[in-house]
Amino acid sequence: MLVIDLIFSAVLFIQGIWMEDIKTIDKGLENAEIEWTRLTTIDGEKGILMYGGYSIDDIIAHKASVEEIQYLFLYGELPTQSQLQAFRHDVEAGYKLPDYVIDIIRKLPRESDAVAMQMAAFASMAAAEVSFKWNKETDKVVAANAIGRMSAVTANVYRHIMGLPPANPKPSGSFVESFLRATFGKDLSREEIDAMNSALILYTDHEVPASTTAGLVAVSTLSDMYSGVTAALAALKGPLHGGAAEASIAQFKEIGDEKNVKDWFNKNITTGNKRLMGFGHRVYKTYDPRAKIFKKYAESLVKNSKEAEKLFKVATALEELGIEKYGAKKIFPNTDYFSGIVYLSMGFPLQNNIYTALFALSRITGWAAHFIEYDEEEGRLIRPRAVYVGKGLRDFTPITAR
Amino acid sequence: MLVIDLIFSAVLFIQGIWMEDIKTIDKGLENAEIEWTRLTTIDGEKGILMYGGYSIDDIIAHKASVEEIQYLFLYGELPTQSQLQAFRHDVEAGYKLPDYVIDIIRKLPRESDAVAMQMAAFASMAAAEVSFKWNKETDKVVAANAIGRMSAVTANVYRHIMGLPPANPKPSGSFVESFLRATFGKDLSREEIDAMNSALILYTDHEVPASTTAGLVAVSTLSDMYSGVTAALAALKGPLHGGAAEASIAQFKEIGDEKNVKDWFNKNITTGNKRLMGFGHRVYKTYDPRAKIFKKYAESLVKNSKEAEKLFKVATALEELGIEKYGAKKIFPNTDYFSGIVYLSMGFPLQNNIYTALFALSRITGWAAHFIEYDEEEGRLIRPRAVYVGKGLRDFTPITAR
């Protein structure tokens, strides 16, 4: 069943201590199955992503609110009106951050990485709040609360970076409206609110990438949920994971104008000097269904920003060329290809890793749902092994004799 | 080669989306091999733990300094006098914490968990300091610096909990002397310094437990080293991992007096009501070599503290009974059984998870060495899979129709 992609033949005679004959490791744990899940599944061939059995195309077409999807992840079914109201109350209870969290965010230099600032905020809450200790009776309410806190943390991280005074979301309007109003200090348009709602839905979960894995490992020791989120943020922060939305748009900026696309492509991509950012995915072998939705929002929102409009033209020209060259190899735009253009159009600047912080604002729902699921069903300490290929037993030489 | 301990037979017909026949998962990734390593190996049958080929018994017998072992982990060989001097300079460069780190520690409530306070401090440095971004040319120096910073963070976490003003270690004397002097504001005895030096050596590394795994997952995304340490701390914090030293001594406290040991054991352990804390280990099938060394230090240091002396008597009586009952099943005291008594004898109080913070002060060396090794040799994004057992494709029902 398991396909091992690397066979390393090592006969190790470690001076009588132990001996191994043939050893294999599963690089990047690509074939290791870490959990059972009821949350998300992907049909990479057909380009279908399902949350709890609902395809994301269907979810977006029905204009579901992100709160409904948050509920679906934590409780396994879509909420009724009254269930949704109670759930929103639990989320909104997280909006008012403790003073020390605001203080800690604002002690950090304004040039700081936004995701690491979220990480410092969640670590500080893990330190201070005993109520977050693991407890199966309360874990869903703690998770809803953590989603609310992530909204407040993200708004305050943004405001600190921008030199604005602190502001927490208020429990009025939807999750997205409350977040955007706290962040920008004003109401955005209906269209922008809808785009943000969809973006938060699209990034909610994607099986077990590195961030979810790091968080699962942390909570498998019965560390608290906020420590799990902290570990997940530590992994999300890396450029091979959450940073792809920023990398895509940075590439459009580098190209600068649609008339440069072909030359840039030949000079950088055809030669193998650079990777085409926002293209390709380990699981999807066709157009990422999320990318299609982001493209639609980008197309309609770029009218708000001259810069975004220009970058969108670059993006579509580059997309056409990329598909022409790589489509036959089943390499297509992924979710991060157009999302940065959507954020830029709404007024989020491309700096401090802010787009990845927006990813985290969405993904905390998936993280928390996986943690709860793992704790309730698997509950096993995660502790893999290493294959020793070092020195055999040798005598210690004192420093004076070295 | 891989032994799969769970076979789950699930025939899932997901409304034409996909179908699985027989699926297995490796619970807790117990049989997954995440990396090659040259750092540490354990012979669980014979009770031998080796760092880079040197047995820890030999290392302790030769009175190696913890700085020599830190160097061994990062550079693969024991240092010469001049190599050690240069390395100590790199470590000491980390002693002076940026002001915002001290401020952040002191913004946290004094009741906070000490490990999560270390986590908030490391997250804040990951946020603010671009020089920590991953770079193969500088990673060993960044690691040495991080070890110095962990000393300063741990001393300041302790001092904040105790209501003392901030103090960073000074580059005078050994790593241990600098740490203890900053922590307690005075010099400890030679015997106490030696015990702390050995404790830091004994906790340096132990293959890939949950903390190291969480950190490896984070750095596999090319997140920075401080984020890797943050993720590792998130996992270490859990009671199934770093909390065992505190759990052992808490158990001695609960028993209270050596004359209660037999009754307590019959009432709690024989009946299966409680687990015998500090006994047993997944890898060791004999007496943990680290436990023997900790016992020797505990034996000689308890004269400093009436409370520790009393608890040591409880511990040895309980040890005798435990071995009598479980020795035949190859269950023996592990490293955490006596370490808490050593810390208590030196003046560290049993509160706020401080003993686990001391574990982290040692283990950061192992974490950093694994991160560097992984990045230099494996360098593969860690991304396991999940097995979907949820709902098949279903139609979305709008909330008004639910």
Image (tube, coloured by chain):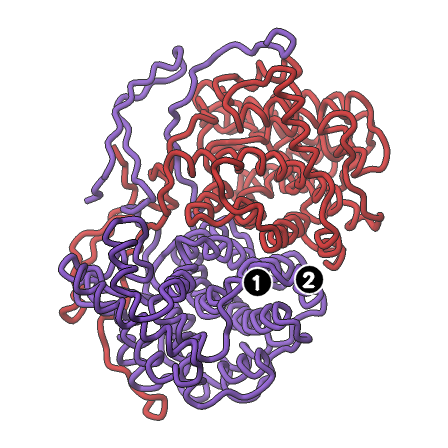
Chain colours: A red, B purple
Say which amino acid is labelled 2.
Answer: Ile
Number of callouts in the render?
A: 2
Left-right relation of B301 to A102 = left
Q: Do the residues labelled 1 and 2 touch (CB within 8 Å)?
A: no
* Callout 1 crowding tier (Cα within 10 Å): few <14, some 14–19, many ≥20: many
Output the chain of dot 1.
Answer: B
Residue receiving disc 1: B118
Q: Where is residue A381 in the image (x, y as percent from the top left)?
A: 37, 47
Q: Compare residues B391 and A83 and report the one nearer the observer.
A: A83
Q: Residue at x 49, y 81 (%)?
A: B176
Where is residue B299 shown, x and y percent of the image? 33, 81
Q: How crowded is mark 2: few (under 14 residues within 10 Å), some or many (20 or more)?
A: many
Residue A232 lies, with reference to residue B378, above or below; the image says above
At label 1, the amino acid type is: Gln
Q: Tell me the SS state at disc 1.
A: helix
Please, is residue B189 above or below residue A308 in the view?
below
Quadrant of res B165: bottom right
| Mark sitting earlier along the chain (1/2) | 2
Secondary structure at numbered mark 2: helix
Q: In which quarter of the image is residue B195?
A: bottom left
Q: Where is residue B62 in the image (x, y as percent from the top left)?
A: 31, 86
